[in-house]
Amino acid sequence: MLDDTTFIVPDTSNEVTADPPAEDAVRAWAARNYERCHPGDSFVDLVRRTRFSKEDRRLMEDWLAAARRRLGRGG
């Protein structure tokens, strides 16, 4: 069961992630920085909206790609 602090990011890439803890760091970085730049919105809510909105899905993908670049994980 998911609580308010847990979020599942849909896998939108075609690559295999060999290091799940690294992906956790990517998600954490993206969430922290998204919420800093978007007060009043949360990364969890953004992830929920990706099921219904291609704009939000692309926004989430951009934040995850930025996190991977920032953390040196490619993307």
Image (tube, rainbow, N blue to C red):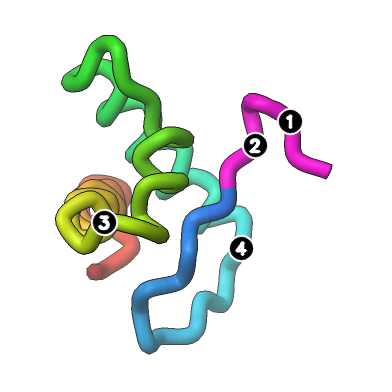
Q: Which residue is mark 3?
A: 53
Looking at the picture, which amino acid does disc 1 mark? Asp
Residue 35 at x, y = what percent? 31, 22
Neighbor class of circle 4 (other Cα within 10 Å; few <14, some 14-19, many 20+) is few
Dot 4 or dot 3, earlier in sequence? 4
Q: Residue, x 57% and y 52% (percent of image)?
A: 8
Please identify, in this view, whether the residue under mark 4 or under mark 3 is nearer the observer.
3
Q: In this rendered view, identify the residue nearer to me: 24 or 58.
A: 58
Residue 43 at x, y = what percent? 39, 34
Dot 2 or dot 3, earlier in sequence? 2
Q: Is residue 32 left or right of residue 25?
A: left
Q: Is residue 60 left or right of residue 48?
A: left
Dot 3 or dot 1, earlier in sequence? 1
Please identify, in this view, whether the residue under mark 3 or under mark 1 is nearer the observer.
3
Neighbor class of circle 2 (other Cα within 10 Å; few <14, some 14-19, many 20+) is few
Distance (Cα) linking label 2 and label 3: 21 Å
Q: Which residue is mark 2?
A: 6
Extreme residue toward the right, this view: 1
Q: Which residue is mark 4?
A: 20
Looking at the picture, which amino acid does disc 3 mark? Ser
Quadrant the C terminus occupies: bottom left
